[in-house]
Image (cartoon, coloured by chain):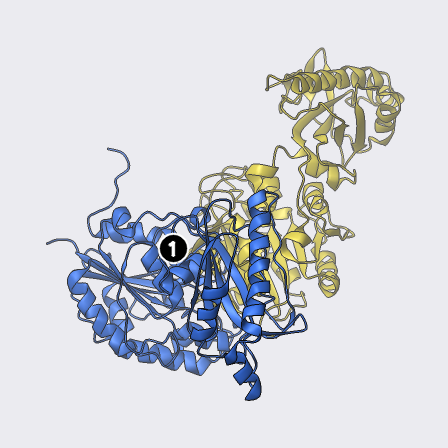
Chain colours: A blue, B yellow
Amino acid sequence: MCVAKKILFVVLDGAADRPTVAATTPLKAATTPFFDRLAQDGILGIMDVIAPGTPPGSDTAHLSLLGYPVNKVYTGRGPFEAAGVGIKVRPGDIAFRGNFATVKDGIVVDRRAGRIDDTKSLSDAIREQLDLDCEFLFKESAGHRAVLVLRGEGLSPKITQTDPKHVGPFLYSKPIAKDASARRTAKIVNDFTRQVSLILGNHPVNVERSRSNLLPANAVLLRGVGSVPHLVPFEKRTGLKAAVIAATALVIGIGKLTGMTYVPTKGATGHIDSNIDEKVKNVNEALKRHTFVLLNIKGADEAGHDGDFNAKTHFLERVDRALSNLEIDDETLVVITADHTTPISLKEHSGDPVPFLIRGKGVRADQTSVFNEYIAATGGMDRIYGRDIMPVLTDLLGKGVKFGA
Amino acid sequence: MCVAKKILFVVLDGAADRPTVAATTPLKAATTPFFDRLAQDGILGIMDVIAPGTPPGSDTAHLSLLGYPVNKVYTGRGPFEAAGVGIKVRPGDIAFRGNFATVKDGIVVDRRAGRIDDTKSLSDAIREQLDLDCEFLFKESAGHRAVLVLRGEGLSPKITQTDPKHVGPFLYSKPIAKDASARRTAKIVNDFTRQVSLILGNHPVNVERSRSNLLPANAVLLRGVGSVPHLVPFEKRTGLKAAVIAATALVIGIGKLTGMTYVPTKGATGHIDSNIDEKVKNVNEALKRHTFVLLNIKGADEAGHDGDFNAKTHFLERVDRALSNLEIDDETLVVITADHTTPISLKEHSGDPVPFLIRGKGVRADQTSVFNEYIAATGGMDRIYGRDIMPVLTDLLGKGVKFGA
């Protein structure tokens, strides 16, 4: 066999950085012998996941890396979160991310209702008592999180969100397009808000919380509204049978909406304490039955958002050690990259390019032997767009889509 | 503060070159310790200001570098020249660059009327006596130059110019689109030509010039026709309060049309003898009250058009010395680049990429320590488009426009 057969695509979420602390980055400071060995055997480059200077969201970033035309298919994050928590969304559904929150006299006093961690019975009450002017699905997610899906004709994602994103006055939804469906959807959302307030206000869980001096979860704030896009299945686009291994609902949802098999991992938290070894075991298993495995490891992004240089550095070292147990020969193309830069200095995503490496049969291995943002910029792949990497990989498998004759 | 706060954007007009003289370029041959120090502290790359192999005009180049979509907003140079000489143009105005010229028996015998340098009273006569079928503004500019603006409904830039660009038969304007406004505009332009010929033919200034054996300025040739575009103000696009420091009407006009403050400089000529020290003083002042300063220095382009390798090299050395007096710490991002390549060998703009450097807080400083076309191609920015540099810079300021969540 002269070409590689499979692809392992590793996204180190938010792992890239800027040199604002000690003129280095966590990836440069970290000791990562496994990544460096891959770099030595492979080819490096830098990648504008969306476009130079455009900070990607994790949602648009993953879609772009998987080869989907984000400008056409993306309207908001809600649909992917909803799919990620297990709702079988359908194209055209309007989906939101939600937060259980504490609202007092029209003011959001805590966006996370005192970081409440069990909302099952509150959600049951919403499901049982809520009566909206369209079909809906509501599901609780990790911690204070939830998702809402509205279904039916005459709905639109062209509305404002009710989550103020910080402590302050509660927001009502307004249409941002001048059509009947936007007006109607905003009205339904405001109706949702009013009814939820009544349903939760005197719910036994909240009565008990107030008695224990805990903040009541008496509202659900909505954001990330989007219309569920029609996504051509990944297997149809690429010919690859794909699995996704991830902890966050978003990435799981993107995998599900693109038709990938979701492989759950025990102890995968999406945080810096995640069980990466278990993920690696799952990858090794998944590679036996799939030709594409998407592995997302979230912790570095969290450390970036927290502005914690040492935590980010040490997490990347731990990831490197764990990934060294991957069972991969050169018939599996391995990609190591990030979905975006999350600089310690910004605590937010930035538009800096991310480094990437490709190792496996057929790659024009370059002179690099270290994996970080600086060395990657000197690599043989130069600088590409995020949307280009899947065509590059499938072409390396000998499955490039020829244009012309 | 973890990110830079301001941007100084230096355009060394036409400074880039090709190795056709002595296998080097003026930028490579020049001794430029200041640029090299910036290179050492910063990151380099090469840039296709418009597209690979497309020679940019100074107009499209500056618009592109400032982040404007040139394919949508640019129809011709006239509007920017008109704004640059102080006409308050409005979106939709049709504007032209003009040359006072000498026409004899229908033949343009000198496109610059013997390089006449005072056309005030000729222009006064045109303004007083001209009677067109639409509102118009006419203004003399440096030397033999002038601008004409036509205003009102039913006008179009889809017409040919009357300037033959070389000695030869005079041209009449023709419509190049099959609509009434193009036909009408061409008719107005030809009417302008006829009337100007009558107004200037026996003007005392020309009678006197003929008596002194000087070529009479008895015609105004028009070129660079364009419709004044609606440009979203630079501050609205970027959040940056901007000033422009430049000598040429074109760059001043682009600054004005994008809402920048124009800071005039004593002794700034746009030629190789320009007072660069005075420009540097103005930059230092402007940086106190603005968060973006565009500095254009024209001389290298002139030397390129003249095919004078030594003049170009020495001018760049003089610029380097003058700019070393810039008062900038690393909270000011400094960009050094060119708007296009003007090879000594061509004496015209070419489509070669231009080198650029970015120095300041947050940049992933690379291993380069010299600023020229060759070293820039090895830099950490690799190769980007001109339209990408403003998003990259605003992102470095922590003001990137996120796509996704």
Q: Is residue B213 left or right of residue B338?
A: right
Q: Is residue A93 left or right of residue A293?
A: right
Name the residue furthest left. A1
Residue A32: in sight, yes or no? no
Residue nearest the observer in this picture, B157 or B201: B157
- Chain of the residue that carries numbered disc 1 in the rendered image: A
Residue nearest the observer in this picture, A34 or B86: A34
Find residue A127 and report its horizontal and vertical position in percent: 45, 65
Find residue A250 and report its horizontal and vertical position in percent: 40, 64
Residue nearest the observer in this picture, B136 or A112: A112
Q: How many labels were placed on the picture?
A: 1
Residue B225: in sight, yes or no? yes
Q: Residue at x 32, y 54 (%)?
A: A258
Q: Which residue is mark 1?
A: A89
Find residue A77 and report its horizontal and vertical position in percent: 46, 59
Q: Residues within 10 Å of mark 1 (few under 14, many from 20)?
A: many
